Image (cartoon, helix red, strand yellow):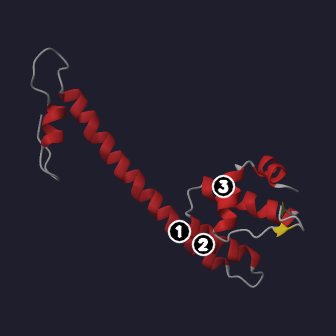
C-alpha cells in the first residue's frame, strides 16, 4: 500500500503518518525508488495509534502501548498502569474544567448585563491570581 491508501484505510492524514514515521512509531518498508510501501501490520499499528490518540494518550504513551502490544511476554499490569495514569490525568482535567465552568457560571449570573459600567466578570479577570472577587 502507498501512503494514500494507508491514509484512507487508517483514517489518518498522510502528514500524520509521515510524522509517526519520523518519530519512529512506524517503520514502513521502502521500495527501490524510495517510496513507502506499507504492509498490513503498518496499517494495524496506525489504527492502534489513531485509536489511542483519540482516547487522549500522548505520543510517549502510544510508544509504550505499542511496545507492550508487540511484546507477547508482556504483563497486563504494565498496560493497566499506563491507562490508570492517563485516566487520572483526564480526571484532573475534568475537575479543572468543572471549576472553571462553575466560576464562569457564577460570574455570568452575577453580571447584570445592562448599561452600567460595573461588571463582576471584568473585576474577577482583573483580580490578582488565586483571588476571586465576590459579586
Q: Residues within 10 Å of mark 3 (few under 14, many from 20)?
A: few
Give the residue drawn at x 65%, y 61%: 19
Image quadrant where residue 93 sits: bottom left
Q: Is residue 112 left or right of residue 36?
A: left
Q: Residues within 10 Å of mark 2 (few under 14, many from 20)?
A: few
Which residue is identified by label 2? Answer: 80
Q: CA distance from mark 3 to mark 1?
A: 26 Å
Compared to residue 40, the image places residue 67 above or below, namely: below
Image coords of residue 83 (percent x, y): 57, 67
Quarter placement of the N terminus? bottom right
What is the total number of numbered labels drawn onto the structure image?
Answer: 3
Query: Label for residue 84?
Result: 1
Give the residue drawn at x 63%, y 69%: 23
Q: Is mark 1 in CB contact (under 8 Å) with mark 2?
A: yes
Which residue is identified by label 3? Answer: 16
Q: Is mark 2 in CB contact (under 8 Å) with mark 3?
A: no
Image coords of residue 118 (percent x, y): 9, 25
Image quadrant where residue 73 sits: bottom right
Image coords of residue 54 (percent x, y): 62, 52
Amino acid at each position: 500500500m502507498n501512503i494514500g491508501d494507508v491514509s484512507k484505510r487508517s483514517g489518518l492524514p498522510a502528514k500524520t503518518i509521515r510524522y509517526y514515521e519520523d518519530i519512529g512509531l512506524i517503520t514502513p518498508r521502502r521500495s527501490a525508488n524510495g517510496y513507502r510501501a506499507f504492509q498490513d501490520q503498518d496499517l494495524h499499528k496506525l489504527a492502534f495509534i489513531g485509536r489511542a490518540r483519540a482516547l487522549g494518550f500522548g505520543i510517549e504513551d502510544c510508544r509504550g502501548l505499542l511496545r507492550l502490544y508487540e511484546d507477547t511476554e508482556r504483563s497486563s499490569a504494565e498496560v493497566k498502569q499506563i491507562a490508570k495514569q492517563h485516566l487520572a490525568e483526564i480526571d484532573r482535567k475534568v475537575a479543572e474544567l468543572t471549576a472553571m465552568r462553575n466560576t464562569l457560571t457564577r460570574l455570568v449570573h452575577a453580571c447584570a448585563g445592562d448599561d452600567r459600567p460595573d461588571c463582576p466578570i471584568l473585576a474577577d479577570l482583573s483580580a490578582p491570581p488565586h483571588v476571586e472577587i465576590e459579586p
